[in-house]
Image (tube, helix red, strand yellow):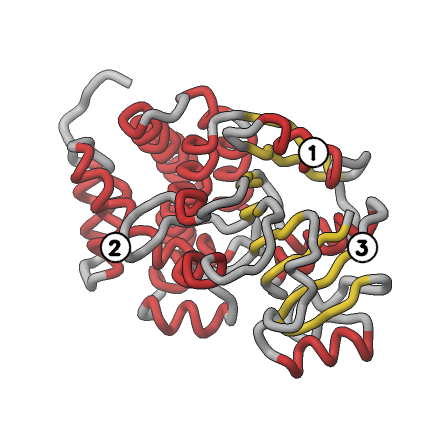
Amino acid sequence: MRAVVVGAGSWGTAAACLLRDNGHEVTLAARDPAQAEAINETSRNPRYATSARLDGISAATIDAAPIAEAELVVVAVPSRVFGEVVAPLPGHAPILSLTKGLDPATGARLSTLVRNRPVAVLSGPNIADEIVRGLPAAAVVASDDLELAVRVQVAVHSVLFRVYVSDDVAGVELCAAAKNVIALAAGGADGLSLGDNSKAALVARGLAEMRRLAESAGARPDTFAGLAGMGDLIVTCWSPSGRNRRAGELIARGARPDEAAAEIGMVVEGLTTAPVLRDLARRLEIELPITEGVCAVLEGSSLTDLVGQLMSRAPTTE
């Protein structure tokens, strides 16, 4: 099929490679003309996933990319601009969202911002650098239109990238958003050298928060035990390449959130998602103590005090 990947960051570049390797005609659409030109001249992305060979992939600016003629439009842009990027896209091809977050302005799931065309979402433990190196990985694609989900599955599935299908769009999207916030906390545990016991306990209780959110938002709790939930949470909280984990570690060691993001040099979705997720939980009248704590730290509270508060909560059943 003819596919356009909108967003030439690490994950967008990796997705373009997956589609190219499966025999599709792929255009990688970048916001910056200089980046697109460099990709066409060198078959490398000069900024992200720089080790990936992009032979057979053409690049263009978003305005110049053949989106109207595409049979699949893959969107891999930050959550804060997702709505404004998808709204003016020409044509009627299905949208496949790779973005892991919520709309900061409204708290809405990103797939709900796509109008008048089919939409699917893909998520899972997918560190972009490992994918472009050809290491095996798995993901789940979800859509209310199961026929579309299967089409996307067939389009990207391979012996190195195993894809499962789900109809729980809400669960997959909420997993993708919530795991980044828990990863900030896990990075904080690393930054304070709290040890593996405390980090494992934090991640397990974080998964419980994610499940509680699922039940209240109408998603299926079992989704949070799968690739989009537990799978992505594990890799995000432990991988040295995990941006959110790394940001939490830097903040624990004294960096401000903006300084941590600047040092990482890429979008850290958890920093945007944390207050949105907290506000969603308050509207749903559920407790997300780790998420509340992460927001407090981002707003200037002491991480050490947060650890004490979490550990001193009244004991209860699991």
The residue that label 2 is drawn on is 303
As drawn, the label of residue 25 is: 3
Q: Quadrant of residue 160?
A: top right
**Earlier along the polypeptide chain: callout 2 or callout 1?**
1
Residue 294 in the image: state x and y as whole percent.
27, 51
Q: Quadrant of residue 147?
A: top right
* Residue 254 visible at all: no
Tag 1: amino acid: Arg
How far apart marks 2 and 1 lie (CA) works out to 45 Å
Q: Is residue 154 left or right of residue 11?
A: right
Gap between marks 2 and 3, in whole Å?
A: 48 Å
Outermost residue, top side: 317
> What is the secondary structure assignment of the residue under circle 3?
strand
Q: Which residue is drawn at the image coordinates 42% and 68% (left, top)?
A: 261
What amino acid is labelled 2 in the image? Leu
Q: Which residue is mark 1?
A: 151
